[in-house]
Image: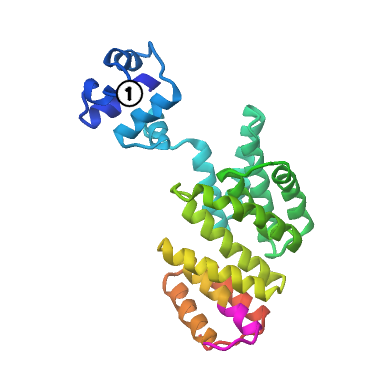
Amino acid sequence: MNFGETIKKIRKDKNFTQKELSEGILTRSHLSQIETNNYYPSYDKFFLLLNRLNIVFEEFLFVQNDQQMLFSQQIRSKISEAANLNDTKQLENLATIAQDLHAETDNIMYYHYMLICKALISYSINHKVNDDMITYVTPIKEYLFGMDNWYLYELKLFNNIIYALTIDEALLFSRTSLKRLGNFQYFLEFQHIEQNIYTNLSTFCLEYRDFKAAKNFAEIAIEKAKQHTLVYQKVCSELNHAIACINLGEDGHPYEVIKKNMLIIKYLEFDNLHEHFLNFLKKFKIEVDL
């Protein structure tokens, strides 16, 4: 479906006449020419039309692409799903697809996706940062260091490679990323990216036994999860916070928090997550009657 046909389809689906859609934005004759692909509006006019139609740009692209999600969005979701399931075969397949797409389009995004897949495969071997993982992540670090300003894409990249950084690199990058987060607070993706960055930073600091920083990041992550009603993320953040508090020798009820959240994870059958936190508890010699 071409540009004009998409505008016309959405307009008709929403029961707008050409007069109703165009009024105050452009002339009715210009809208008619847009719908027949004889005229293209300026960016500001185009987004005013989308706003009146009550759709976002991604939704427009979805309709224009005949109700198919753009593959650049599909592959990102598939990588996340494969990583959560620890599905190395799928990650290998996605790495190959991304590599082929990069060769075909020269789009650096696909190069980054390929590197992330290969880094995740390396990490899945023993769930420890290794030389191969660092090798794959290094070009992404160099890319991020070369950016004067980060946007949502760079924030997501940072979130994907936190575990392969040194503690100094992670804290340096976090200062850049957290400073930029507020600029995107009204984007739908923002709430998940923001919360995940804080949760992953708390996990990362636990790995490096910086328990004070881990506790601080986890506290923010818990508040963000509550704010955005992100249950899964809240459970992870509360577990990180409890582990940090125990290692700091602080009072409270961290053991009860661990027991409650581990039961939630088990009940929801998040087996990989349950195993991850069991290993974490064992690593820090925390004994809880589960």
The x, y position of residue 67, in whole percent, is 37, 34
Note whether 53 is above or below 197 in the view shown: above
Q: Would residue 41 be counted in the magenta stretch?
A: no
Q: Nearer the viewer, residue 242 or 29?
A: 29
Q: Nearer the viewer, residue 218 or 59?
A: 218
User: Which residue sits at x=33%, y=24%?
Assistant: 7
User: Which residue sits at x=66%, y=60%?
Assistant: 124
Question: Mark 1 Cα within 10 Å, few/some/many (few <14, many 20+)?
Answer: some
Can residue 193 be seen here?
yes
Q: Nearer the viewer, residue 118 or 89?
A: 118
Note whether 141 is above or below 56 in the view shown: below
In the rendered structure, the answer to whether residue 85 lies left or right of residue 164 reads: left
**How is the structure coloured here?**
rainbow
Q: Total marks drawn?
A: 1
Q: Residue furthest top?
A: 38
The x, y position of residue 98, in whole percent, is 62, 39
Q: Quadrant of residue 178?
A: bottom right
Can residue 271 be seen here?
no
User: Which residue sits at x=29%, y=23%?
Assistant: 8
Q: Would residue 243 be counted in the magenta stretch?
A: yes
Name the amino acid, label 1.
Ile
Q: Quadrant of residue 56?
A: top left
Note whether 68 is above or below 113 in the view shown: above
User: Which residue sits at x=53%, y=47%?
Assistant: 183
The x, y position of residue 248, in whole percent, is 65, 83
Q: Dot 1: what SS?
A: loop
Q: Which image quadrant: the N terminus?
A: top left
According to the image, label 1 marks what residue?
Answer: 25
Query: Bounds of the magenta span?
Result: 242-252
Q: Residue furthest front?
A: 24
